[in-house]
Amino acid sequence: MTYLDTIHTAAEYVRRKNPKFSPLVGIVLGSGLGKLAKEIEDPYVLPYGKIPGLPISTALGHKGNFIFGNLGGKRVVAMDGRIHFYEGYGMNLVTLPIRVMQVLGIKYLFVSNAAGGTNLDYNVGDLMVIKDHINLLPNPLIGPNLENFGPRFPDMTRPYDPQLIREAERIAKEEGIHLRKGVYVACSGPSYETPAEYRYFRSIGADAVGMSTTPEVIVARHSNIPVFGMSVITDVAHATDDEDYVTDGEAIVKAADAAADKMSIIFKKLIEGLQES
């Protein structure tokens, strides 16, 4: 079976399970950010493990379900947990859920993650709108181009949609939510970053670092789908100056969970304002 066959087989299975549902927005929920899933009305939950070809998410804080329903009055499909390169999956599998959502008809992609703040001004619990990224993971478009999805060399000048960013800033101001705006760098993990790596990422222009997101964004932009991205800052570079400091995965999930309510407000109001056509 070719990769294209795998995409369409998985999408067809999902369609059979929910034949009348055509999502406007795809949402990817990162570590500890599953609270937004509870906001989805009339949910239909489909575990990844039941969908032909889809891998199972094994990461901490990732449930591994597609959730279909309504959010902000719009039809959405949310990934309650994503697939990571560090789990041992190739990029075709990491981005397979995004390809499936594209076949299902999404017109927008919203992505979120928990990230370490390399910017020394950042604090745990800050929300950062992603304005650009640095991808240090293998590019998911390596290999034969999927001509039906997009061109061989897609433009990445504006990977995150400027209009959606402006609207998110307006909503945050209206709601009294403090937003950062910065550059996200993606590396492979699964080990957390050393202090020297934090300094390196900061020196190349990154404000936050994580282990995901960029492959999904590249695949969405391959098909010219507008993307909005947000990071929850769950640990910070300046904390590593303390000799007793340890980066702890469970603490990161808890920090993300604590900030998830604010992120949910912004996502929900952004989706409310989206145009159907």
Image (cartoon, grey):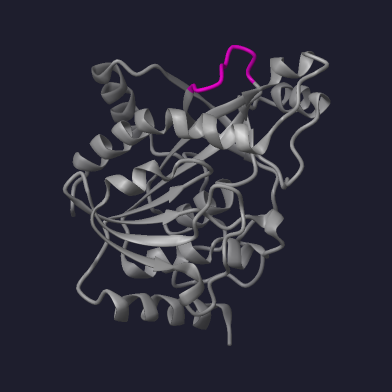
Which secondary structure class fits the magenta region best?
Answer: loop
* Residue 169 visible (yes or no): yes
Say whether residue 56 is left or right of residue 192.
left
Say whether residue 191 is left or right of residue 79.
right
Which quadrant does the C terminus fall into? Answer: bottom left
**Depth check, front residue: 162 or 78:** 78
The spot of residue 269 in percent (x, y) is 24, 35
The spot of residue 190 in percent (x, y) is 73, 46
All told, the count of numbered labels is 0
**Is residue 223 one of those drawn in magenta?**
no
At a point 24% along the width and 66% down the height, the residue shown is: 22
In the rendered image, the vertical position of residue 47 relative to residue 128, given as above or below = below
In the rendered image, the vertical position of residue 127 relative to residue 159, given as above or below = above
Which quadrant does the N terminus fall into? Answer: bottom right
**Depth check, front residue: 111 or 159:** 111
**Is residue 122 one of those drawn in magenta?**
yes
At a point 26% along the width and 56% down the height, the residue shown is: 24
In the rendered image, the vertical position of residue 225 relative to residue 202, given as above or below = below
The spot of residue 120 in percent (x, y) is 64, 14
Q: Quadrant of residue 224?
A: bottom left
**Depth check, front residue: 16 or 56:** 56
The spot of residue 204 in percent (x, y) is 71, 26
At a point 39% along the width and 39% down the height, the residue shown is: 161
Over which residues does the magenta segment extend?
Answer: 119-126
At a point 61% along the width and 52% down the height, the residue shown is: 59
Say whether residue 233 is left or right of residue 166.
right
* Residue 131 visible (yes or no): no
